[in-house]
């Protein structure tokens, strides 16, 4: 999935679901 514009959102998603932020 494409990474969100908000860095905080990325951190949240990364902490909640690492697979959510798949580069």
Image (cartoon, rainbow, N blue to C red):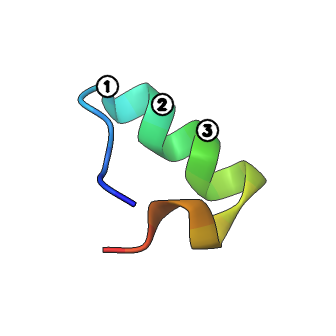
How far apart are the alpha carbons under marks 1 and 2?
Answer: 5 Å
At 60% from the left and 46% from the top, the residue drawn is 13
Q: Check the image and name the residue furthest to the front.
A: 1
At 61% from the left and 38% from the top, the residue drawn is 12
Tag 1 residue? 6
How far apart are the alpha carbons under marks 3 and 2?
Answer: 5 Å
At 68% from the left and 53% from the top, the residue drawn is 15
User: Of residues 6 and 20, which is closer to you in this image?
Assistant: 20
Q: SS class of the residue under badge 1?
A: loop
Left or right: residue 2 compared with residue 17: left
Q: SS class of the residue under badge 2?
A: helix
At 32% from the left and 37% from the top, the residue drawn is 4
Left or right: residue 11 compared with residue 7: right
Q: Are marks 3 and 2 in contact (CB under 8 Å)?
A: yes
User: Of residues 11 and 20, which is closer to you in this image?
Assistant: 20
**Quadrant assignment, res 17:** bottom right
Crowding near the residue tagged with mark 2, few <14, some 14–19, many ≥20 C-alpha atoms within 10 Å: few
Q: SS class of the residue under badge 3?
A: helix
Q: Are marks 1 and 2 in contact (CB under 8 Å)?
A: yes
Q: Is residue 11 above or below residue 15?
A: above
> Whole-percent x and y of residue 7?
33, 33
User: Which label's residue is closer to the chain start, 1 or 3?
Assistant: 1
Tag 3 residue? 12
Tag 2 residue? 9
Crowding near the residue tagged with mark 3, few <14, some 14–19, many ≥20 C-alpha atoms within 10 Å: some
């Amino acid at each position: 999935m494409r990474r969100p514009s908000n860095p905080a959102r990325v951190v949240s998603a990364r902490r909640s679901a690492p697979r959510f932020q798949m580069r």
